[in-house]
Image: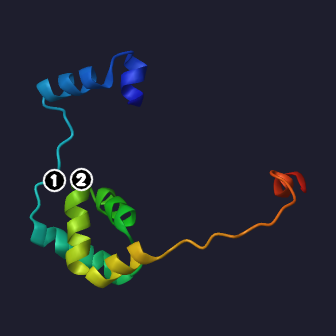
Amino acid sequence: QKLARTLDVHRNTLHQHLQINGLAKHFSDITNADIDILVHHYKLGCLDAGLRFVLTSLKSHGLNIQQERVQMSLQRIDPLGHIIQHQTAIQHHIYKAPHSNYVCMAY
């Protein structure tokens, strides 16, 4: 997107020209079994790592893998962790104030 803005062309036009010239970004040619191995090794060192952390780690090692494939690997490798991560609820604080914006105005 940044490059497209710099060149003052639409991002789809830029992507099309990159593809024509063989410069388009391609996904890594890797099997699901190999993804599972890599994700398993990463999860051993960082048990609570989620999808974003794993994707970032893989990209830092030069692997560009579809998000859906990594997500499915996480579900295969750590099904319980996946369930727990999606079941965790955020605790919200309940504020009691005499009128709206009172808490913000108090500072």
Residue placed under numbered mark 2 in the picture: 64
Look at the image and tell me in which quarter the N terminus lies.
top left
Q: Amino acid at mark 2?
A: Asn
**Residue 51, position in %: x, y?**
34, 65
**Residue 6, position in %: x, y?**
42, 21
Look at the image and tell me in which quarter the C terminus lies.
bottom right
| Residue at left offset 15%, top offset 29% | 19
Q: Is residue 10 above or below residue 42?
A: above
Q: Residue furthest right?
A: 106
Q: Is residue 66 above or below residue 24?
A: below
Residue placed under numbered mark 1 in the picture: 28
Q: Amino acid at mark 1?
A: Ser
In front: 73, or 19? 73
Horizontal arrangement in the rendering, residue 42 relative to residue 31 (left or right): right
Q: Looking at the image, do the residues carrying marks 2 and 1 touch, with CB atoms under 8 Å apart?
A: yes
Q: Earlier in the sequence, mark 2 or mark 1?
A: 1
Residue 106 picture quarter: bottom right
**Crowdedness of circle 2 by 10 Å Cα count: few (<14), some, many (20+)?**
some
Horizontal arrangement in the rendering, residue 16 relative to residue 104 (left or right): left
Residue 8 picture quarter: top left
| Residue at left offset 31%, top offset 25% | 11
